[in-house]
């Protein structure tokens, strides 16, 4: 297991992710359970907000992480947080509306995709997410209200994904799925 570490974050007005929300806590919990995985080479944080998930993954595996968000302020916040935590050599933040950025396409496939988004966005981006995921790659889907989790699971199952783990904190569910 990786050594414990502390991130110092400045979230910014439009950048979600200071670890106080149950969806972020769920995603961090799942990331902690993945600590022992070896061979992780490429990580994408879709909807990075402050960059907390990207920074955690970069620290945990010491691999390059591509972090993207539709909000320019979130991209700036993620970049500043990577610099402040001395992870800027590993974390690259970019402005992107979903998977449309050329850098995402050129960097795919990803061993791990992190996505702390609302359920409708998970459904909207499901095909693109799976397309950008490596064979046997993992995806962490967070930001899902408990009552929507089965709908998300079924949508991703239809695309060849298998549920590996489910974590619920309060009304929020985080899913870990693997491409088969």
Image (cartoon, grey):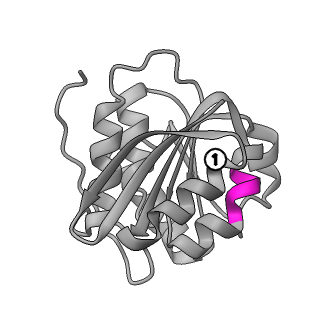
Q: Quadrant of residue 94?
A: bottom right
Q: Residue at x 52, y 41 (%)?
A: 177
Q: Say which residue appears at 55% left-offset and 34% top-offset.
A: 64
Q: Quadrant of residue 23?
A: bottom left
Residue lying at 40% horizontally and 50% vertically, measured from the top left = 53
- The quadrant the C terminus occupies is top right
Is residue 164 toward the left or the right of residue 20 in the image?
right
Which residue position holds label 1?
157
Residue 2 x %, y %: 25, 24
Residue 146 located left or right of residue 92: left
Callout 1: SS: helix
Magenta region: 125-129
In this rendering, the answer to whether 79 lies above or below 76 is above
- Say whether residue 96 is visible: no
Q: Position of residue 46 (x, y in %)?
A: 58, 57
Does 57 sit above or below residue 143? above
């Amino acid at each position: 297991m990786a050594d414990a570490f502390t991130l110092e974050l400045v979230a910014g007005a439009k950048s979600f992710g200071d670890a106080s929300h149950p969806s972020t806590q769920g995603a961090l919990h799942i990331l902690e359970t993945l600590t022992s995985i070896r061979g992780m080479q490429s990580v994408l944080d879709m909807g990075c907000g402050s960059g907390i998930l990207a920074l955690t993954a970069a620290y945990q595996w010491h691999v390059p992480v591509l972090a993207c968000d539709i909000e320019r302020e979130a991209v700036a916040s993620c970049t500043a947080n990577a610099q402040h935590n001395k992870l800027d050599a590993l974390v690259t933040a970019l402005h992107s509306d979903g998977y449309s950025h050329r850098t995402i396409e050129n960097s795919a496939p990803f061993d791990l995709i992190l996505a702390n988004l609302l359920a409708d966005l998970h459904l909207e981006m499901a095909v693109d997410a799976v397309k950008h995921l490596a064979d046997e790659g993992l995806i962490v889907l967070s930001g899902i209200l408990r009552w929507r989790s089965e709908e998300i699971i079924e949508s991703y199952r239809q695309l060849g994904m298998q549920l590996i783990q489910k974590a619920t904190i309060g009304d929020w569910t985080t899913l870990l799925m693997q491409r088969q």
